[in-house]
Image: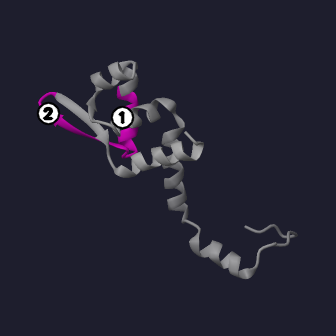
Amino acid sequence: MHMANSKLKINKHQQSLIDYYMPTAEVLTGLSEFFSVFSDPTRVKILSALSITEMCVTDISIVLKLQQSTVSHQLKFLKLFRMVKNRKAGKTVFYSISSRFIEEALNTGIAFLGY
């Protein structure tokens, strides 16, 4: 959207590149939702642990020193956003990250921050 009295400092070629490559509204919403998952330290902690090994809720809560109810709530959220998947073994449900892209996003953030 251009303001009526403003003058663009970019040329037509640059504008056409922006118009061509700008993600659609649907993609922008998806990206915003994807990155919002990483805005909570508890979720990042759980994703980091699950990128190392699959675990059940009890193991996650013990290893990460979190309440089981907190872990369950966050796993439900992470599952809703397709960040984690689960498998049943008897009565136990094991969780793991759903894609290597989750681990790559975590590692990219760590690298960007210089850690």
- Marker disc for residue 89: 2
Q: Residue furthest bottom?
A: 13
Placement of the N terminus among the 4 image quadrants: bottom right
Mark 2–mark 1 Cα distance, whole angstroms, equals 19 Å
Which colour assignment does the render follow?
A: one colour
Q: Residue furthest front?
A: 115
Which stretch did the figure color magenta? Answer: 72-91
Q: Earlier in the sequence, mark 2 or mark 1?
A: 1
Relative depth, front residue between 51 and 98: 51
The spot of residue 6 in percent (x, y) is 85, 69
Q: Is residue 43 above or below residue 2?
A: above
Total count of labels: 2
Relative depth, front residue between 24 and 45: 45
Q: Is residue 17 above or below residue 113?
A: below
Residue 15 appears left or right of 72: right
Q: Residue furthest right?
A: 5
Amino acid at the residue labelled 1:
Lys
| Residue shown at 37% from the left, 26% from the top | 71
User: Mark 2 and 1 residues: CB-CB less than 8 Å, in contact?
Assistant: no
Query: What crowding class fits label 2: few (fewer than 14 Cα within 10 Å), some (14-19), or many (20 or more)?
Result: few
Q: Is residue 61 above or below residue 111?
A: above
The spot of residue 16 in percent (x, y) is 66, 78
Placement of the C terminus among the 4 image quadrants: top right
Amino acid at the residue labelled 2:
Ala
Residue 61 appears left or right of 20: left
Q: Which residue is mark 1?
A: 76
The spot of residue 113 in percent (x, y) is 59, 42
| Residue shown at 81% from the left, 67% from the top | 3
SS label for mark 2: strand
SS label for mark 1: helix
Whether residue 73 appears in magenta in the rendering, the answer is yes
